Amino acid sequence: MAAPKTPGITEPFPEDEPFTRRDFLEMAGFSLAAGLLGAGCRRAPVIQALPFVVPAEGIAPGEAVWTTAVCGACTAGCGILVKNRDGRPVKLEGNPRHPVNRGGLCAAGQASLLGLFDERRLGAPVIRGATATWGEFDRQVREKLQGIVQRSGKVVVLTRTVTSPTLQSMLDRFRSLYPGTEHIAYDPLPVSAIPDAHLSTFGVRVLPRYRFERARAIAAFEADFLGTWLSPVQFAADYATGRDPDRSSPADMSWHLQVESRLSLTGAKADDRLALPPQGVELLLAHLAQDIAQRRGHLLPIAVPAPPVPSEEVKRIADLLWQHRGRSLCVAGINTFRIQVLINVLNFHLDAYGNTVDLSRPSRQHLGDDCALRRLAADLRQGRVDGLIVWGVNPVYDLPEGDELARIIADLPLSVDITPRLDETTQVATFVAAESHPLESWGDSEPLEGVFSVSQPAHPRFGDTRSAVEVFAAWCGDHPDGQRWVREYWHRHILSRLAGIKSTADFETTWRRILLDGFAETSPPAFPDLSLRVPELSFEDFRTPPSGPALVLHPTPAMLDGSLAYNPFLFELPDPVTKVTWDNTLQLSPTTANRLGVQDGDVVRLGKSGREVELPAAIVEGHPDDVAAAAIGFGRTESARFAHIGPRWLFARESTNSDGTVGVNLSPLVEWRGDHRCWTVESINLEPSGIRKPLARTQEYFDLQVRDRLLPKGAHSEPVVVATDLDTYRQQGLTGAPADRREGDDLWSEDHPSPGYRWALVVDLNLCTGCSACITACNLENNIPVVGRDEVYRNREMHWLRIDRYLSRRNDRLEFTFMPMMCQQCAHAPCETVCPVLATVHSEEGLNQQVYNRCVGTRYCANNCPYKVRRFNWFNYPYARTGRERLILNPDVTVRTRGVMEKCTFCVQRIMAGKARAKTEGRPVADGEIAPACVQSCPTRALTFGDWNNPESQVARLMNHPRRYYVLSELNVRPAVGYLAVVRNPQLEPGRNPATGESGGAKHV
Amino acid sequence: MNSRIVTVLLAVALGFELFLLAGRLSVFHYPGIHRDYEPDQPIRFSHRLHAGELGVSCQYCHYAAGRSRYAGLPPTGICMNCHRFVAAPWGAQVAENKRAEEEKRAPRQLKSDQIIKIYRSAAFPDSSQPRFPIEWVKVHNLPDFVWFDHRPHVSVGLTCQKCHGPVETMERVRQVADLNMGWCVNCHRDSNRSGVLGKPVHAPTDCATCHF
């Protein structure tokens, strides 16, 4: 059969056809247009508007109402302001006047708002897996409790640290009604060796309040106080006040030494950092304590093997601490008795007590008791406990003996878990009491002695839930009304202690004022007299060197103890150091990884006395050799729901492991040292498993050095991070900073005029700790979607603001810098010139605008952006766009659809709202009145926003600061974001610390 | 396929489209423009009577216009401020009173069928009944990607009629402006040129004024 002739392929198109292809296309196009026009004439769907029936006093629709509350993400007790839009909380911000956090709020705190809208939260109490009513629940629990009391059994109430005085009084009442009840508190992130050591050395069980703002010499041993330790927002704010290199006297800038067995966020900020294996950290501390005690004429009764660093180095550190005595502070994050005793010795002899270690207003944030916990575990094993009531903790997950406890709890006559959602412990508990979210119920907190915060509900309850106070009130036979109990406690016990309150007659007025402020303070009591007693300590066990590498466990600022595993915002928040999302990793030094033959993402099998876990490796430069570090708080069963959190498409992969967890639970590896849970595990076995698990990380290359061969010919590169030493800075000012612009090669000959406001941002790199609070604040403020592990792996994360972690080498010293990077709002923006549809253009207020409804998604702008801050919506991301979770969306910001580019806008919705407010009041916008979400949330106030055109504004002053430089200024794009150079204050000389490499000795980094 | 058949088919399709369009040509708008939208409302509320004849200020009911993005609709409680005492048109009640006098009986308290709907919403006078909001139909709608704020427009002294038209003459509210971007921007440009109420103003024409 002959092949048919195909026009257009074998032959030219016939031209004499009456109806050509061109005609056809014309007709088809016109029909389509006509059809669309016809369709377009249809009315939009009818939209209803429902006003109030009774006008709410002081509330206008669309106007935000702010109420005070206490953050419930951890026990630090930061004061928060809840932004309520039309009856729905949409954002949490730190209360600027609260004495704990002073305006900042950490990533976990910001994200905890999602818990309120969590659809999988329990909506009613559960008995043996079946939903019940509270009446039935209370009846059965009380019956069992009375039965246990009658046969003189024992009930244990196991909680996290109770910071709420109302709950504490309710627990006391509960114990008096049910004799034989014991209350035991523990902290999932244990610090109980600190109060225990104080009990031993000073006779008082107290957790001091560390005053980093008063310290001029800070020595931290494994304490990640800027990231996760005790009360990081409070400490970061304190620490920042001592880090200003521009004060009149150079002695005003503190010196910060970090001695640690991993690279922590705090270590990355330190002036001097010693990366030692865990034994080395402890030995160095012991030697320092001996040295300092000796200077006071005391001899410490400790025998210590040789120090891990040269003895001159120990002496130099001791000299520096001694020189600043009264203004020096030592802290240790190692939860063992002997370490904390040594810290007390150091602080006592350095006159820190009463100065940098405050006992007059001690912390009540973490008063858990590991000794009691250990006793409880033994009692449970021996069957001496008949009933267990759990609140605020998840012992089956938290504790090393969790699996064993689960079996015991399942067999107890009475097991109650008071929890907002199903977790590992509820699976074995008979009774599950549905707990309200902190924003649904009344509560209070006493984070520091004499500082009382009150928390009022911001939203009606979603289900039939109760707060812990109400649960215990019901079991005491009282009315389960949290508001009544909180008010009554404050009326009876707190108000009389507040200054200026004379009689109970003005309770209502005072109460209203306290609700507005969110907190109240009593006058601090006198500082107690202390005398030091040092118990006998021994380091004999260190004489035998460990037989294998050590493992150091640590929490991350996002996941903390793992209780926020319902929160995908936190899974997607990159770890500040490794920049890995949706996983915990095994951090190894390059040398150790080399020896094991593993690379980033190679799964390493980690074994210790029969237990084995597998973790992907992440190589971290600056990590000590022969030490592995890994994060706890992962591997929760609760995260199974996030398997398909990302967009559904052909090649989508799950965000969770095959068993529904994210990362691996490492709590079973935590070891008991004496009566304390310790995160250091000696002598582990590491071997590569041969499996690869590629990491979903947002930054893969950390080194700042650009190799010459990577530079285009003739190209000139300026430093991205400008850093200097305090001495050099004092003598010569900032050297090595790039010029603000380079001659020639300007994109535009003229600047955009900004006659009115010109918004600008200044980032003080010296103050940025990398804590990532700003990223989460930005995510929640700007409706940024969660994309899931697989999309992050494809480099499609949507965070408008990222924090780059850089590594540089200067004088044989490794230096780390955190650099928040958001849209620089360039005056001569490369993105604007390439947009074919003018979807990104410059505003007269200096903003680089992104018009979503105009964007057609060519992505040219992202390709042309030198800062790589533009994000493209590859999909309509499903999470929090439907269901109850979508209530977290900010109603002032568009939800972008697929095919649209987006980026930081300096929170233009806040700028517009601020301008509208000022205009209504007939005045210009005041300096500091408008704060983008990142600026507002920063615990250290590292970011400053304002009007650059106003010479009086803070931001204009900082733009003229001698430390100010622009990133990539050689491109002449004229950013509106200035960076203040890092000034470090190193006091140890790197030359004196030869890196000893493999032997596990000191490596000065 | 025979090209003539295609031509005929297309012509028929085009004719059908034109036929569909013709029916709408009297109210033709470009897609997305809902000028002359005048939906039925659950209550036959007359702006002509309240705002025109009785001279009630716009912001008495739409009280949020000066302090919030949204002007808002009056809560039933605002209606009840007056309608607690006014249950029927004045003229009707006067007539009833007169008739009652003539017929030597006590005058009946008239209740308009529309005002009864307000009473039902506010559970008046029997407060044991459930209260519920009145489900008004929103007339002036903007797309979700537009952020409009009443505050600066009110504070600069623009009259409501500038955008909403002569509402005080309307029995039922009708959208008189296009409410599309060109309409907004033209007014902003005009205001920048000639000011508002004789005062110079700065009406921004940046994209991010409305789109973010």
Image (cartoon, coloured by chain):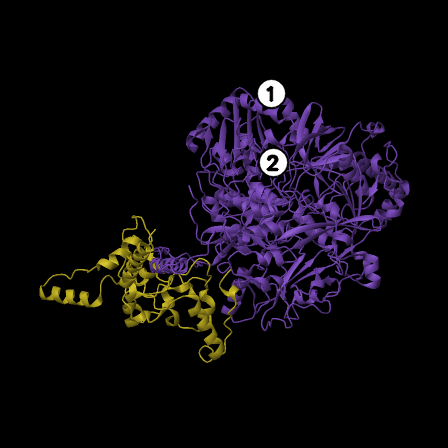
Q: Is tag 1's residue or tag 2's residue first in the polypeptide sequence? A: 2
Name the amino acid, label 1.
Arg
The residue tagged 2 is A160
Q: Cβ–Cβ below 8 Å for labels 1 and 2?
A: no
Q: Which chain is purple?
A: A
Within 10 Å of disc 1 (Cα), the crowding (few <14, some 14-19, many 20+) is: few
- For residue A459, above or below residue A138: below
Q: Is B160 or A83 nearer to us in this picture?
A: B160
Please give the label number shown on residue A384.
1
The x and y percentages for residue A913 are: 52, 62
Q: Nearer the viewer, residue A950 or A847?
A: A847
Furthest toward the front, the residue is A2
Tell which subunit mark 2 falls on: A
The answer to whether A461 appears left or right of A348 in the picture is left
In the displayed structure image, the side of residue A283 where residue A556 appears, left or right: left
Q: Residue at x 47, y 78 (%)?
A: B195
Residue A694 place in picture, x, y as percent: 64, 38
